[in-house]
Image: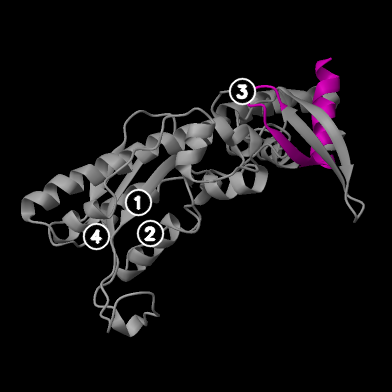
Amino acid sequence: MSVNKLSKKDRQLIIDQYSSNKPRKQVQKELSEFLNVTKRTIRNYANELSLSIKARDVVDDKIMVYDIETSRMEFTGWWTGKQYVNHKQARTEPKIISVAWKWLTQDKVYHLTWDKDHCDKKMLVEFLEQYNKAAMVIGQNNNSFDNKWINTRAAKHKLRVDRYVKSFDIYRMAKRYFRLPSFSMAYMANYFGLTLKQSHEGIHMWDMIEYGTKEEQTEYLQKMVDYNKGDIVTTEELYMTLKPYFGSVTNNAVKQGLPKWACPVSGSVDVRLLKTIFTEQGTVQRILFCEDSKHQYKVSNKSYMDFLQRKIINN
């Protein structure tokens, strides 16, 4: 039997039970007994109402903020000054020197560095154990820089990278939604009144890490780690400050088994209609506003009808 043949009261009961914090099996058992149907029928009802997500589709909702620092390359040339450098002139390959990360809203910042022989394989093995657990990673220009570096060095060492980890690039999103004189992390942190990006000694730090004495390499590698970890703090603050103005790259509501019309950022059901738009193809779309996260987002007209149905029943 289709869920549409149930009364509004019974449909609302299913929605409310699936939105509760009860274990899914307990919800299905209680509903099947109350409605006098099988648990499979309850699961079918939930699917029709877009409430049910399969366990294999659920990922641990961990969001990672991360940043890397990389080494330089050595080239041979005939002279100084501006000139074209061919890849055949390269004498070394660039590597990842350090990586720092934290889980969103948690305090601890983690870090790893290349080994004493300037090899980044062991560091990547350990980091990817954490990276591959993430539902989403956040960074500054990470889509063009950090993510590609991780993929490149992982491929070099034949390591697995979960390519279905979502990526949120603050730099790219800021350029899309804002008009600022600069989109550097240092400028944006200062502009929005956040923790300022740490400074460092410039090229000298890389000189010491790559070519210094053993003692100098140890000293300046620690300075790079401190700088790297400082970037993580600023990156997280930028994301938390600006996310109400950005779009979302994942749907936290659906992850929690909530209706598609719930807020994709917070999962809140305290939402209201802002406006209705019509596409050139004749599709009706609804723009909703979440009172908790202050996020604006778009849902289909069907999802909005489900929202209205629940609102009418509750009233």
Please report the bounds of the magenta region as a residue range: 290-315
Residue 30 image position (x, y, % from top left): 63, 24
Q: How many marks?
A: 4
Residue 181 seen in this snapshot: yes
Residue 159 versus residue 114 in the image, above or below:
below
**Quadrant of res 26:** top right
Asked which secondary structure carries label 3, the reply is: loop
Residue 293 image position (x, y, % from top left): 63, 26
Residue 248 versus residue 162 in the image, above or below:
above
Q: Mark 3 or 1 closer to N-term?
A: 3
Task: List the residue tagged with mark 4.
Answer: 120
Left or right, 135 with respect to 255, comes to: left
Mark 3 vs mark 4, CA separation in Å? 46 Å
Task: List the residue tagged with mark 2.
Answer: 150
User: What type is the residue that disc 1 sits on?
Assistant: Ile
Q: Mark 3 or 2 closer to N-term?
A: 3
Task: List the residue tagged with mark 3.
Answer: 20
User: What type is the residue that disc 4 sits on?
Assistant: Asp
Task: List the residue tagged with mark 1.
Answer: 68
Asked which secondary structure carries label 4, the reply is: loop
Residue 172 image position (x, y, % from top left): 57, 50
